[in-house]
């Protein structure tokens, strides 16, 4: 399964969130507070400390959780590329706040001060992201292992399951709360999917000079094949069908499929024009253009 171009190109909000999560985890780990960050009944209905609330949102409580959590956050950057940094910022804020409210409600219903703390970390955002992952990311490959059928999406689900069960009951509760938050966002409650922040909020993240992974974004061109060297371009032109007439536009469903995989909308449309609206051929063309 392709998550789109490597690195944080066109995903500055994801980059900022991942860096913040890693820094908070390291900071509280050095101080020996990682195991004390999780929220409990007494924290919510006794004396709520602001530092603990913030820490519980960003910092993971263990190294394995940090590794799986950051991997999933990094993969889910595809949604920022799909809906844009502005709306993705709204998605993050909505997922975090709503999942926290569900956690507060669950702790209130339990009414047991002796209940262990729920584990800390951005579980709300991570598991809320599994809702659009399930509905919007298509399966591109199926394979069998010992007779059991898997898809290329199975690896993401397995990573999520590992994170969900990492601390057993302490991690299951925030995971379920995140899924509920993602479901409410999917249902467009209060028209949340149309909400946007002022542009200066999201443009702030794109101005940050943190180093990124992967290749820098390529300059826009008029032809997908033009992104590759001339010899590669000639090879692609021989292997793929000639473009459709300019008057024929690819379907919106095909464009949406490629955009959901992390490709730029304009590049996806151009590739579909060349591939005569064949999604598989267009995907290969985009991948080859990236490789060169």
Image (tube, helix red, strand yellow):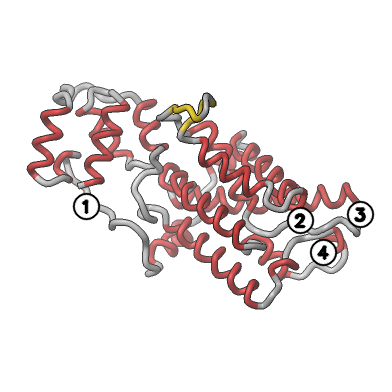
- Give the x, y percent position of residue 240: 17, 27
Q: Is residue 97 above or below residue 16?
A: above
The alpha-carbon separation of the residues under discs 4 and 3 comes to 12 Å
**Disc 4 vs disc 2: which is toward the camera?**
2
Which mark is on residue 219?
1
User: In the rendered image, which residue does mark 4 sit on?
Assistant: 43
Q: Residue furthest front?
A: 146
Whether the residues at callouts 3 and 2 have beta carbons within 8 Å, the answer is no
How crowded pointer 3 is (Cα within 10 Å; few <14, some 14-19, many 20+) is rated as few
Q: Earlier in the sequence, mark 3 or mark 2?
A: 3
Spatial CA span between label 3 and label 2: 13 Å
Dot 2 surroundings within 10 Å: few (below 14), some, or many (20 or more)?
many
Read off the residue under disc 3: 112
In the rendered view, tell whether residue 129 sits above or below residue 43.
above
Q: Residue at image x 75%, y 47%?
A: 173
- Residue 172, given in percent of the width and then of the height, sits at 72, 46
Identity of the residue drawn at 12% across and 41% down: 232
Q: CA distance from mark 2 to mark 1?
A: 46 Å
Please indicate whether residue 204 sits to the left or right of residue 279 in the image. right
Residue at mark 4 to residue at mark 2: CA–CA distance: 11 Å
- Pointers 4 and 2 in contact (C-beta within 8 Å): no
**Which numbered disc, 4 or 1, marks the residue that appears first in the sequence?**
4
Residue nearest the observer in this picture, 181 or 139: 139
Which element type, helix, strand or loop, lies under badge 3?
loop
Report the residue marked by disc 2. Answer: 118
Q: Earlier in the sequence, mark 4 or mark 3?
A: 4
Q: Which element type, helix, strand or loop, lies under badge 1?
A: loop
Q: Is residue 66 left or right of residue 210?
A: right
**Image point (38%, 42%), residue name:** 262
Question: In the image, is 28 to the left or to the right of 195?
Answer: right
The secondary structure type at the circle numbered 4 is helix
Mark 3 or mark 1, which is nearer to you?
Answer: 3
């Amino acid at each position: 399964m392709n998550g789109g171009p490597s690195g944080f190109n066109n995903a500055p909000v994801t980059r900022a969130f991942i860096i913040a999560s890693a820094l908070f985890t390291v900071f509280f780990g050095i101080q020996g507070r990682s195991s004390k960050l999780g929220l409990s009944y007494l924290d919510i209905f006794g004396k709520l400390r602001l530092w603990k609330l913030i820490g519980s949102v960003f910092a993971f409580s263990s190294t394995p959780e940090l590794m799986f959590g950051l991997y999933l956050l990094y993969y889910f950057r595809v949604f920022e590329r799909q809906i844009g940094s502005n709306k993705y910022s709204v998605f993050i804020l909505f997922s975090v706040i709503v999942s926290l409210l569900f956690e507060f409600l669950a702790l209130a219903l339990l009414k047991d001060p002796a209940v262990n703390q729920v584990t800390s970390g951005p579980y709300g955002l991570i598991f809320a992201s599994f809702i659009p992952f399930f509905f919007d990311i298509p399966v591109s490959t199926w394979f069998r292992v010992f007779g059991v059928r898997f898809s290329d999406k199975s690896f993401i689900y397995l990573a999520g399951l590992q994170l969900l069960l990492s601390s057993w009951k302490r991690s299951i509760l925030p995971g379920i709360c995140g899924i509920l938050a993602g479901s409410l966002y999917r249902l467009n409650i209060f028209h949340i999917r149309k909400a946007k922040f002022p542009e200066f909020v999201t443009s702030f993240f794109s101005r940050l000079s943190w180093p990124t992974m992967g290749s820098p974004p390529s300059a826009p061109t008029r032809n997908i094949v033009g992104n590759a060297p001339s010899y590669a371009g000639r090879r692609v032109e021989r292997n793929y069908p000639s473009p459709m007439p300019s008057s024929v536009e690819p379907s919106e469903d095909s464009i949406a499929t490629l955009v959901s995989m992390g490709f730029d909308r304009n590049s996806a449309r151009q590739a579909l024009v060349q591939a005569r609206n064949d999604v598989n051929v267009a995907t290969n063309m985009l991948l080859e253009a990236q490789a060169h």
